[in-house]
Image: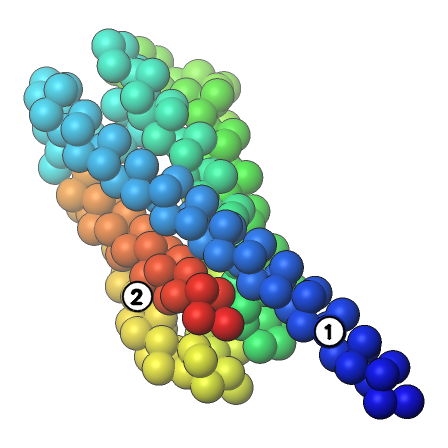
Amino acid sequence: MNIFGRAVGALTDHRASRTDRRAYLAATISLVGVGTFMVGVALLHVLKRDLNPTQHFISEYALGGFGWIQRIDFLAVGVGTIALALTLSRVVKNPGRIAPIFIGLFGVSALLVAFVQIDGPQPITTEGQAHEMISAIGFVLLISGMFVIAKKFRSDPAWSALRRPTIAWAVTASTFFVFMMVLGGIGQRIFIVACFSWMLAMAYHARNLARSA
């Protein structure tokens, strides 16, 4: 019986170790993906100075010269966000399904807008309208996921300290999302910083937890 108990314990530890390794890898992918987006957008502010950041939206960097950088940015943050959703589903105690799914769907929307371009100065097109719709739905899902996961953090000692900061991040993102059309490019950039800095912080914390497990 003792031998059987030790065997079961060893198998459980092995499975837990595999879960930790996968969570660590997913968190690392998330950091790289979201970080790539932030660096890429910062670079485009230098390369495409004809676009005033206070007036033009980030998606407009995908148009014209150096547009391929922004498309790579979208793909990178899409993969990174899906990786974050998988990470949170593994390392947060009782994360539920809603928050990881919502966050993961935002990642899917980022992948989609890499291939569906926003309208430029030209007349409104079906593709441009689709881009705006996909982006808006994705943003709403991400903000909703932030609020839902914050509630789950309450019951997990390893994450409880991040509950209130997550709510603050989500409220900031919600505020600038609502006023994005009024504030223009600068409002969107504050919104993006709020959302993506949260994702980086969550991925970093999850990576540390997986490494120390």
Residue located at (56% from left, 63% from top): 20
Question: As drawn, is 103 to the left or to the right of 28?
Answer: right
- Up-down: is 120 above or below 131? above
Front position in the image: 20 or 129: 20
**Which residue is at the far front?**
3
What amino acid is labelled 2 in the image?
Trp
| Crowd around label 1: few <14 · some 14–19 · many ≥20 (10 Å) | few
In the structure shown, which secondary structural element does the residue marked by tag 2 occupy?
helix
In the structure shown, which secondary structural element does the residue marked by tag 1 occupy?
helix
The quarter of the picture where residue 86 lies is bottom right
Instruction: Residue 121 in the image: state x and y as whole percent.
Output: 26, 15
Question: As drawn, is 132 to the left or to the right of 87?
Answer: left
- Residue 8 in view, yes or no: yes
Q: CA distance from mark 2 to mark 1?
A: 40 Å
Of the 4 image quadrants, the one containing the N terminus is: bottom right
Residue located at (25% from left, 14% from top): 66
Instruction: Residue 87 in the image: state x and y as whole percent.
Output: 53, 58
Q: Kindly identify which residue carries mark 1.
A: 10
- Residue 177 in view, yes or no: no
Front position in the image: 187 or 42: 42
Front position in the image: 148 or 17: 17
Q: Kindly identify which residue carries mark 2.
A: 169
Residue located at (43% from left, 78% from top): 159
**Which residue is at the far bottom?**
2
The quarter of the picture where residue 6 lies is bottom right
Q: Which mark is residue 32?
A: none
- Of label 2 and label 1, which has the lower sequence position? 1
Residue located at (16% from left, 43% from top): 186
- Up-down: is 9 above or below 49? below
Instruction: Residue 16 in the image: state x and y as whole percent.
Output: 65, 68
Instruction: Residue 173 in the image: state x and y as whole percent.
Output: 31, 58
